[in-house]
Image (cartoon, helix red, strand yellow):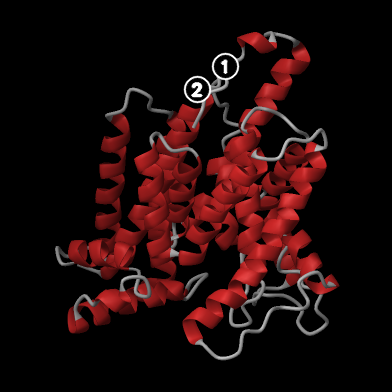
Amino acid sequence: MSELASYSIQAVFFALVAVVAVSRSNKTDLYQFALVSIWLIGVVAIFARYGEDQVLFYSNDQLFHQQVIDHYLPVDGIQLNAVIGLRYLLTVPVYLISLLGFNAMLVIKFFQLCALLLIFARAKALAKRYGFRTIYLQIPLFAGPLPIFMSLISLRDVILAYLTLISIFPTNPKLRIVSVVATGLLRPHLAVAIIFGFIFEALYRQIHTRFQTILSTLFLILSYFVGAIGFALGNFATNGGILNFPTTIFSIEYISRLALNIVGLQFLVLDGNTGGVVASSTVFLLISRLLFIETFLVPSVFFILFLRQSYILKKESLQVGTAMFFFLGLVFQNTVSTNSTRQNLPFITVMGVIVVIRIFHDRVIRTHKYSLGKIEVPTA
């Protein structure tokens, strides 16, 4: 049997498992079956085009996962000091399943698909709590082209997006703790950003003022500043040496990077030294934004709504907004790597859900279909 045939059969098997799992729910949606179908066609097409070199498609971070599963775990075993560095939360289960004969990279892609389906289900449940049903035109804001594409890649970003979503919108407090810990095992600085988002939101609630928009803006700036300082402190605590606090946090370069991240154009870097942060051409990346529309539409609309004060999802908006600014402040100080769209996916996913609910709520208020007293405001 050829490699492609074997891979395709495995992909069909995993797709059928997903379909069966989705079908068992009483809340099955046609969009879920569409997600599985697109995933199946996508993963097979990528393997047909690249073969085993699929790990080099889009991001060589897939190659790292392959090396951990094919070399480090079989040879070195499990070591406590490598739990985070080798992403055991993801790689160990994948390694164990691969012992049954499944392609390890395909297993990671299946986990990504499962996370995408869970994001869709959780978003639908949240919409129902706020008294409306999502329509297909709204779904791309939280389960659209970007997470669909990422589910075709052997990375961890869709999984992290789901963990972030249930951290901000948990069904119970214990689930929030579990999801933050799991996030920390896969991407520690994202977990730290989420925790600081909770802290900033709690501090915000202690301040009572009529100037809520100004206060919200100040908290965004503060979270960005604390994130930048936090990188210096974390680097000093981890590596020692001289404690150097950044002095260019509010320079034109960094402020431009912050603004470009918010509108999904972080590949345009105004630093005078490089033309961007990724290898693809600027024209190609600009055109790609027409496909991955949520990369600029969701953050842009979210922060516009963020500054328009509303009691609907105010707490969650503060949590994810300040968490993202903290995260950006932190990663901007990393001279080794740069921030990419996929790293923002967890924030974009949560923001997408908030945007959908906020837009529905604002439309209800404008049309006066319900009085304010009849609109139920669920608590997370």
In the image, taking residue 5 as reference, residue 209 lies left or right, namely right
The residue closer to the viewer here, 198 or 74, is: 198
Is residue 326 shown above or below 135?
below
For residue 364, say whether it is visible.
yes
The reply to whether dot 1 and dot 2 touch (C-beta < 8 Å) is yes
* Residue that mark 2 sits on: 129
Residue 19 image position (x, y, % from top left): 31, 38
Q: Amino acid at mark 2?
A: Arg
Residue 203 image position (x, y, % from top left): 63, 46
The residue closer to the viewer here, 281 or 350, is: 350
Farthest residue to the bottom: give it. Answer: 241
Q: CA distance from mark 1 to mark 2?
A: 8 Å
Q: Residue at x 65, y 40 (%)?
A: 206
Q: Amino acid at mark 1?
A: Glu
Q: Which mark is residue 376?
A: 1
Image quadrant of residue 96?
bottom left
Q: Residue at x 61, y 62 (%)?
A: 327
The residue closer to the viewer here, 302 or 5, is: 302
- Circle 1 SS class: loop
- Circle 2 SS class: helix
Is residue 109 shown above or below 358?
below
Image quadrant of residue 221?
bottom right
Residue 146 image position (x, y, % from top left): 56, 52
Q: Which quadrant, please, contains the N terminus?
A: bottom left
State which mark lies toward you, 1 or 2.
1
| Comes first in the chain, label 1 or label 2 | 2
Total numbered labels placed on residues in the image: 2
Q: Residue at x 49, y 86 (%)?
A: 239
